[in-house]
Structures are given as C-alpha cells and as structure tokens.
Image (tube, coloured by chain):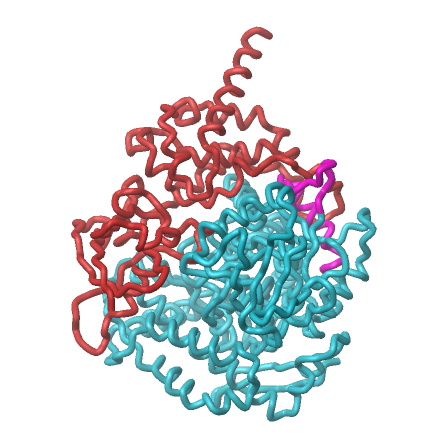
C-alpha cells in the first residue's frame, strides 16, 4: 500500500521533499499557494553554500563557522549533518542541470561571504534561486508526466486535520479561485511554508512568508521554538516597492561599509556579530568604488544593473545608503532529529523548521538548508507513514467533513461579522509597528513601554470585516485569515521577548561568540489559557 | 496630499462583463503600480458601506523577481512592481493580460506556462533523487546569463502577435528556458530529443520574427537569439539526417 503524503509549500524544501517522497514510492500531493518559481526560494540571490573538500575546505570548518554565527541557536548535530551533505546538495543541483559561475581559468568560482572563514559560496550571477527553482519545476513536471505525483497550486493551506488520538490525518485547504474548501487525506504531512520574516516591514522576503501556516499548526498542538529571534541584514537597499540585499559576495569583493560619521566597518574580518544581532548602526553606506570593474562585469552585472534600475538612491560612483532589513526568521516549528514536530504525523523542513535554519546567518546557507531539510524530511515522513497502524484512508469520513465544515462556518462568520477594521491596513500597520519597536535592539524595557500600543493594535484583529463577500477568487477572506494569524504570531513574539527578560535568560542573547552562547531555548505551546512559555536550559 | 487617477479594468469572474473603475490614489514617494493597487485596498473604510471592493491581483515579492504581477499598464505589458507611477503619463490605465483568461480583475490564469517543461522536456532523466557525491567541477560556466533568469511572467506571450487562441505557438519563454537548459553539460545530453520537441507544431518555426518578446522581457533574456539558435540547430539537424539518409 502506497502511503499518502501531503507537502505544503512548493519552495526549495517543499519541491525537494515532494521529489524525494515520490521517488520513494509515496503517493505525493504538493499543495501550494503558488508555483515553485514564484516562491520565496526563487529570490535567493546570495548563492548556495557548500563545503567541497577538493578546495581544501573541511566539514569541521564549515560547521564551526555556522555555529559561531548562529550564536548557538542552531542544533549542532543537524548543522553537522547538513555540512556533511552540502557538497552532495551542490552535486544534486549539478545533476539536475545547474551551472555555476566559473573562474577565469574555468573552474568553479567560490565566493566569500560575510562571517565565513573561507570562500564557499557558489553562485549563478544574481539568479541562483531562480535557476534552482526552474530546475526543480522541471523535475516536478517529469514526475507529473509519469503520473508519480500530483500538484495542487493556487490553494491556500488552512490547517492540519488532527484526529482524537492527536494524529495528523491530512490538511484542509481552500481553492483561491472558486473558494472550494477541501480536505486532503494524508498519512503524513510535511510543512515547508517558509519563515515569517514578512511579519516585519522592510523584510527581504515575499509577502507570503508571514508564518500563518506555522500558527495554524501551533494551534493544533505543534510547539514553536525561539519565535523571538530574527536575522537582520544591514545591507538592504530599497528597490521598487520592496527591499533586496546587496549580495555578500559583492560586499566581500573589496566594498567598504561605513557609518554616517565616516567610521569604517569591516564586515569581512571578525565583525560578523553585527549580522545576527542589532548592534550595528542604523544609517550605513556602502562604497563599491574599490571593487574591480572587471569582477563586477564578470560576476555581478545583473546585481548592479538591478540595483541601478531599482533603487532611487543607488549610483555606481557614490556610496549607497543601506537599510537595515529583516532577512529571515530563526525560529520555527520544533522538530526532532527526524524532522518530526510535536504533532504526530506532522513534519517540517526549511525555514519553517527550527533545526539548521536558526543557523543561516551565513549567506547561502538558506538554500542548502532548505534543500537538505526537504530531502531528509521526505525520507522520515515516508518511513513514518509506512509504520502507522491505521492509514488515513481508514479514518472516519466525519473527521474530514467536520474540518471542512469548520472552515466554511468560519468563512460565513467573517462575511456576516459586524467588524469595522480593514485587514489589509492592519497587517501593514502591524508590520511597521513590529519593525519600529522590535528591530531596533532597545530591549525588553522598551517593549514594556510600547506594550499597550501593541495590544490596541492586535486587538483590532478581532474586529476585522469583509467588504468583499463574493464567492469567486475572494482574496479578502484569505487575507483576513492571514492577518489574524499575523496578529497572533506578533503577540507570541512580543510575549516571548518580555518573558525571556523576566526569566533572566536574556543575558545569554547578544555578546560572545562561543558555541553555546544561547543557553536558553524558548519553547511555546498552545493551550486554552494562552501561550505556555518554557525557557529550557539548552543541553 | 497629491492624488493621481488610476483607471482599472475590472471583471468579477471569468464569465462576467469587464468594466472600468476610476480610483483617486494618494501619491507616495517612489510608488509603484503594485503598491498603488495595494493601497486602494488599504484605504477602503470598512466602517461604512462604500461599495468599493479591493482590486484582485497576484503579487508576492514586490521587487520584480517572482513574475506574478504582469499586467497591461497604459497599454504596455509590464510588471506592476517594477513600474513607477512617476514614469507614467496620466491618466494611468491598468488592465489584465489579454492572452490569458481572466480569473478576476487583474488576476489571470497562467497555468499553461508550466506546459513548456513538459513540451520541451526541460529535465534531466535522473536515476534517483538521492544525494551522493558527484563531480561538480564540470558545472562551471563562464557563459554570460543570456538565457537564464526567466520568471515565467508571461510578458513575452502577451506581446507576441503569434500567440492567440487559434495558434499552437507555445511562446518565446519556452525557448529561452530551453536554451538555458541546453547550455549546461547535463542538459546537452538529450539535446536532440529536445530539439525535435521544439521543432514540432507550435514550436520555434512558428515564430514570425517580430521580436517583441525580447523588448518586453523584464529579465532581459535574449529571446530572439534563443529562437534563432534553436531554429539553426534544428535546421542543421534535419539537413544532417537528410544527407546521412
């Protein structure tokens, strides 16, 4: 009997998980709100990190760099496993047909990245993520043409379906076009919906990465780890309506970063702490005039072209004004060494999970971590699905009917509610508030002062109203649901920072670069009375 | 506050009749069309019945890399997130792509773009999906990225006079993707099979050489060069086959 696996999210980790699970003989459904090419992974312009022994690199050196930069937030065993596989991840991309930038002699060009002891970033100009997702899409098309998997794009994930025994039996999702609510049965579910960086204004991520899927898993019983940690990137530049980051490889190629007072900051040697925490100055400039023009032409022409066309403040001669941006979220669903969350049958990989991802302070690690995470989680999910006593096809139909009904009822309730708040406006205001108050490194005392403002803002999420009540392609219902989740997650982050201070667990956060500088791990569980925080000593 | 006028062509569902709606939008510094469309939804006052509903359109990245927000802006196909309001002449008109069926307002059904993968077999026949150590040195490519970076926005189809309901022509993006694929060592292996696919009905030979695709491509892919190269390759292939008997 083929186990059925539903994979939610079609980014790098989701696509990879779907391919591996289908090749392992599972009946795979890849459910996503958009195609792989439009996922957040496709915007990864930094490159892929890998340690190639041939280049004189060692696994230990790579792992040490990651652990040092993650300030002990990463699970060192997971990091080691990823580092060992990183060369093979690169190999897999090459097998799929990926090409990378070459040195003048024609060998693979390894780029430097901030915080890394040696060059191990492999790039294809500024389109590494786009190329990888295109190739993954090709492989998905191949599996589809051979009838080995199904894809359901354009569906919004609502929540996992959990039976009375606390086992996940599938997911319920809504079609963004005809608004049909449907339950998808599954023996195991892998969540690959990415992080929640777009909860903050000035985020480098897609607006879809808002953690709403993570919150619905949390509500059903999956615990979240370290939600209050996000990774900042001081090298953001404003482009069009969004933000993008100057690639690390370009920064390391003789660019000079300096503050308004002219104080020079060398981000290549030793000053890496600034990337993870907030102690870098708010107004910074980058001067690229010392970068070899030949090098720019050869490797960075797309990046610089893009920055030129995108940013009103960018010019090749003058220094660029940099913005401090939110790069990625470090927290996520708690997973064990088999990628299983605390909910039976629910697995997580990529930015969604908190294993290696907390470690992605190094540029390019995010793609490696997502591809590797997706790959291994698929194996564990298939193994789990083979081992369960009762498959989801034997589960009572009423379980799925009830799940669908609950979503439909909630939709009706939203439509008939008497709220007066605009969900779109609120989620924007919330993002601005979160960025202004949480990303400035002022600590918990400042947060206590702004607590009331936050409560007033987040309470508005209970009074959202729906102006659009049509039953066709109603983005407003989806947006309303997402906004509520955003408010819940923002609240969770707020509480976690304040409680961490109260637990005296805060002094371990900044400072120091020892392996275990983060001695406490925040674990959050859902309960009827609200969030239950647990600051466990890290072992 | 400075306001500007936006005329948006809306449609409630695929069968519904299209209609134009005018919006007065407050101007923001560096505002793009995507941001303006977003702000229409944000500015609706929910405490009173206004009868205005937010404009439905696809967008995700807001920086021109996800290819979601392609639409006709002042009659020209462009990504809404890369088009600044200040660069447009007033009044600004925004309408959905015409080569795809409208889902709602500016949101169109672009599912068929994924067909290129199957039609041109844009994949390597991998034996398995396991991670194992292989030689990666061969993947180093000194070539410029002439053909890579397609975001599947559909602009090349919109601008192409050959693409219509009654034509089988797949569109230039497929050939850009194909060339990007054929240029890699692993992609070269089954080049003949892919070329044969590309030469079928609806393939490269249906291109009329208008070259609009290259002009509108937001990623700057050299599509006409891709089509030319593929045409040459498939022609050379068939001559070779002819003389060899």
- Using the image, determine if residue B213 lies above or below residue A133: above
Would residue A378 be found to the left or right of residue B150 on screen? right
User: Which residue is at 38% across, 54% downward?
Assistant: B81
Residue A392 percent location from the top left of the image: 52, 63
Is A270 or B157 nearer to us in this picture? Answer: A270
- Using the image, determine if residue A48 lies above or below residue A282: above
Q: Is residue A202 magenta?
A: no
The C terminus of chain A lies in which quarter of the figure?
Answer: bottom right
Residue A56 percent location from the top left of the image: 83, 51
User: Which residue is at 43% across, 26% downward?
Assistant: B203
Is A91 or B226 nearer to us in this picture? Answer: B226
Q: Which residues are magenta?
A: A82-109
Count of number-bearing discs: 0
Chain A colour in the picture: cyan
User: Which residue is at 44% across, 60% downward?
Assistant: A242
Residue A273 percent location from the top left of the image: 68, 72
Q: Quadrant of residue B7?
A: bottom left
Q: Quadrant of residue B54?
A: bottom left
User: Which residue is at 53% across, 66% downward?
Assistant: A195
Residue B127 percent location from the top left of the image: 67, 40
Q: Is residue A93 magenta?
A: yes
Q: Is residue A96 visible?
A: no
Chain ID, red in image? B
Is A399 or A178 nearer to us in this picture? Answer: A178
Q: Is residue A348 visible?
A: yes
The N terminus of chain A lies in which quarter of the figure?
Answer: bottom right
- Using the image, determine if residue B31 lies above or below residue A525: above
Is A217 or A297 nearer to us in this picture? Answer: A297
């Amino acid at each position: 009997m083929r186990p059925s696996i539903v994979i939610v999210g079609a980014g790098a980790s989701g696509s990879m998980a779907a391919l591996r699970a289908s090749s392992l003989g599972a009946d795979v459904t890849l459910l996503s709100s958009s195609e792989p090419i439009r996922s957040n992974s496709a915007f990864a312009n930094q490159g892929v990190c890998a340690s190639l022994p041939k280049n004189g690199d060692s696994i230990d050196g790579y792992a040490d760099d990651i652990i040092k930069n993650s300030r002990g937030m990463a699970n060192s065993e997971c990091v080691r496993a990823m580092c060992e596989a990183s060369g093979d991840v690169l190999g897999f991309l090459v097998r799929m047909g990926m090409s990378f930038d070459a040195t003048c002699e024609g060998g693979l060009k390894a780029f430097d990245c901030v915080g890394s002891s040696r060059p191990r970033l492999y790039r294809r100009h500024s389109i590494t993520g786009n190329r990888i997702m295109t190739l993954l899409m090709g492989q998905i098309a191949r599996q589809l043409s051979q009838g080995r998997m199904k894809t359901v794009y354009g569906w919004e994930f609502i929540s996992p379906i959990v039976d009375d025994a606390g086992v996940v039996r599938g997911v319920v999702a809504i079609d963004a076009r005809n608004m049909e609510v449907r339950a998808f049965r599954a023996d195991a579910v892998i969540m690959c919906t990415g992080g929640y960086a777009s909860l903050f204004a000035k985020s480098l991520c897609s607006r879809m990465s808002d953690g709403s899927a993570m919150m619905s898993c949390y509500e059903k019983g999956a615990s979240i780890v370290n939600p209050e940690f996000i990774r900042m990137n001081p090298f953001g530049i404003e482009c069009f309506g969004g933000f993008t980051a100057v690639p690390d490889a370009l920064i390391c190629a003789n660019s000079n970063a300096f503050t308004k007072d002219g104080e020079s900051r060398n981000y290549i040697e030793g000053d890496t702490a600034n990337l993870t925490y907030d102690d870098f100055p708010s107004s910074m400039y980058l001067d690229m005039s010392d970068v070899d023009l030949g090098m720019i032409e050869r490797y960075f022409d797309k990046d610089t072209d893009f920055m030129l066309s995108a940013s009103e403040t960018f010019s090749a001669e003058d220094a660029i004004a940099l913005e401090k941006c939110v790069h990625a979220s470090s927290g996520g669903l708690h997973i064990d060494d088999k990628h299983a969350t605390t909910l039976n049958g629910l697995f997580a990989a990529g930015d969604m999970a908190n294993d290696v991802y907390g470690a992605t302070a190094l540029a390019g690690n995010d793609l490696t971590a997502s591809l590797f995470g997706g790959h291994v989680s698929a194996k564990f999910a298939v193994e789990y699905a083979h081992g369960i006593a009762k498959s989801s096809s034997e589960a009572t139909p009423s379980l799925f009917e009830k799940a669908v009904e609950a979503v439909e009822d909630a939709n009706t309730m939203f439509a008939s509610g008497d709220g007066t708040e605009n969900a779109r406006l609120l989620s924007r205001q919330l993002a601005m508030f979160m960025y202004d108050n949480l990303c400035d490194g002022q600590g918990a005392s400042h947060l206590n002062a702004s607590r009331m403002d936050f409560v007033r803002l987040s309470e508005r999420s209970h009074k959202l109203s729906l102006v659009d009540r049509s039953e066709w392609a109603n983005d407003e219902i989806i947006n309303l649901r997402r906004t509520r989740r955003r408010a819940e997650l923002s609240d969770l982050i707020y509480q976690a920072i304040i409680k961490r201070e109260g637990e005296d667990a805060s002094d371990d956060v900044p400072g120091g670069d020892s392996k275990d500088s983060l001695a406490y791990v925040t674990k959050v569980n859902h309960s009827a009375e609200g969030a239950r925080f647990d600051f466990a000593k890290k072992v | 506050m400075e306001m500007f006028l936006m005329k948006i062509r809306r449609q409630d569902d695929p069968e519904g009749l299209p209609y134009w709606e005018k919006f007065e939008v407050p101007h923001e510094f560096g505002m793009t069309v995507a941001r303006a469309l977003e702000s229409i939804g944000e500015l609706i006052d929910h405490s009173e019945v206004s009868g205005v509903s937010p404009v439905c359109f696809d967008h995700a990245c807001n920086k021109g890399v996800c290819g979601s927000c392609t639409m006709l802006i002042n009659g020209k196909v462009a990504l809404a997130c890369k088009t600044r309001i200040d660069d447009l002449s007033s009044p600004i008109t925004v309408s959905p792509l015409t080569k795809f069926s409208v889902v709602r307002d500016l949101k169109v059904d672009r599912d068929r773009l994924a067909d290129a993968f199957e039609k041109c077999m844009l994949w390597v026949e991998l034996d398995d999906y396991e991670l194992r150590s292989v030689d990666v040195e061969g993947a180093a490519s000194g070539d410029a990225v002439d053909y890579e970076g397609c975001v599947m926005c559909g602009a090349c189809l919109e601008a192409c006079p050959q693409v219509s309901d009654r034509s089988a022509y797949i569109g230039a993006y497929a050939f850009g993707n194909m060339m990007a694929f054929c240029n890699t060592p692993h992609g070269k292996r089954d080049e003949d099979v892919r070329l044969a696919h590309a030469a079928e009905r609806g393939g490269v030979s249906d291109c009329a050489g208008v070259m609009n695709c290259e002009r509108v491509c937001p990623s700057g892919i050299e599509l006409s060069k891709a089509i030319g190269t593929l045409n040459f390759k498939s022609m050379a292939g068939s001559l070779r086959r002819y003389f060899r008997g």
